[in-house]
Image: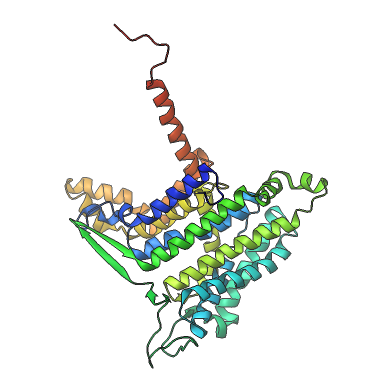
Amino acid sequence: MFGLNSKDTSLLLVVAVLTLLAPFILNPFPENSDLAQFNAGYPDLMQRFVIFGIFAIGFNILFGLTGYLSFGHAAFLGVGSYAAIWMMKLLTLNVIPAIFMGIVVAGLFALVVGFVSLRRSGIYFSILTLAFAQMSYALAYSVLTPITGGETGLQIKPIDRPLLSNLEPGEIGRANLFGIEMGNSYLLNVGGWQFTFNAGYYIAAVVMLIAFYISIRIFRSPFGMMLRAVKSNQNRLNYTGLNSKPYTLAAFVISGMYAGLAGGLMVAMDTQVGPERMFWTASGEVVLMAILGGVGTLIGPVLGAGMIKYMENILSKINDAILHQWFAFMPDGLENFKVAIIHPFIGKGWHLTLGIVFMLVVIFLPGGLVEGGQRIGRLFRRKKRKDKPSPDATPAE
């Protein structure tokens, strides 16, 4: 199906079903429940799940297949965002041309950066990409302010009159897909639950599924096999007479285009962009996503992106007041003790929790969350085999 084998087709269908049912899956607790704090089924967060999933998928094509670790991938995310916002400000508020422009400009920028950076490998390559990203951030923050808006960034303003729009004087344009605004939502109330179906999320989700499908085809293609050969032993590959540079450069550009796609979608969902998207911490974040989920796996980067964005948006909102509500049934002394113990790991301290999780994954699950799922699956299969009677066994009297 779709040129995929049965296993990859099943994986694609599972991802599609989970994406379609995300408003239900991410809202397991009733709205009035104390545990509603852990619900993640609201549009902004769901959009971040799929957009950063695309970003991580693209990064995994470079790092997972070739072994080249880029510390500057956020530069392509930022460049794609700036290209998309300018397309909306000048031409049309339809998100398709904006996203397309983000992909193209990010791809061209990746071609330049990759051509220079791929002259080196290992830590030298990583430092070069980091240097390019920080230079891009500095340019966007202070030098190219007429183009980037400097510290305040860019957004759609009442004075913007895109060429292919029919806005009234003073009206602020809104991103749309042939008239469907990204903020349009339908609320479904079932008992104590409220489920939100957001147009922007489903548009981004469809793009993510297409990006995921393309990544599967790349992983299973002869091109993907060449990239794995580069990761395995690039020197030996060069000794055979094959020039690996065009393959690594192509992987770098494709990865940059994925980042540009994510940047364009971020602008489509929220029509503003600032230089912070190009800062080195954003590049480090996508590295964590890939490692947490499972480098070199198909679904791993998406899982890693979802996990980090969930912790960033859910754990960071928990404060001492919420903790006191949870432990109100305890005696005052024990309640305060519990709150004091948990306090460093929530709110602004959510990075500490992320660091601990990352450390545990690296030590006990080098293959990331995917390896954890595989271990659980093998455990259940082993248990089923033990419970299943042998064909030669004689029933007890």
Residue 64 visible in rendering: no
Report the coloring of the rendering: rainbow
Q: Quadrant of residue 157?
A: bottom left
The x and y percentages for residue 184 are: 33, 71
Front residue (pair 80, 191): 191
Q: Quadrant of residue 168?
A: bottom left
Residue 197 lies, with reference to residue 180, above or below; the image says above
Q: Residue at x 60, y 81 (%)?
A: 143
Tell whether 53 sits left or right of 139. left
Front residue (pair 394, 156): 394
Q: Residue furthest bottom?
A: 169
The x and y percentages for residue 290 are: 53, 52
Q: Residue at x 42, y 71 (%)?
A: 269
Residue 322 visible in rendering: yes
Q: Residue at x 31, y 8 (%)?
A: 396
Residue 269 lies, with reference to residue 2, above or below; the image says below
Front residue (pair 3, 246): 3
Residue 395 lies, with reference to residue 255, above or below; the image says above
The x and y percentages for residue 6 are: 51, 42
Q: Quadrant of residue 315?
A: bottom left
The x and y percentages for residue 173 are: 41, 83
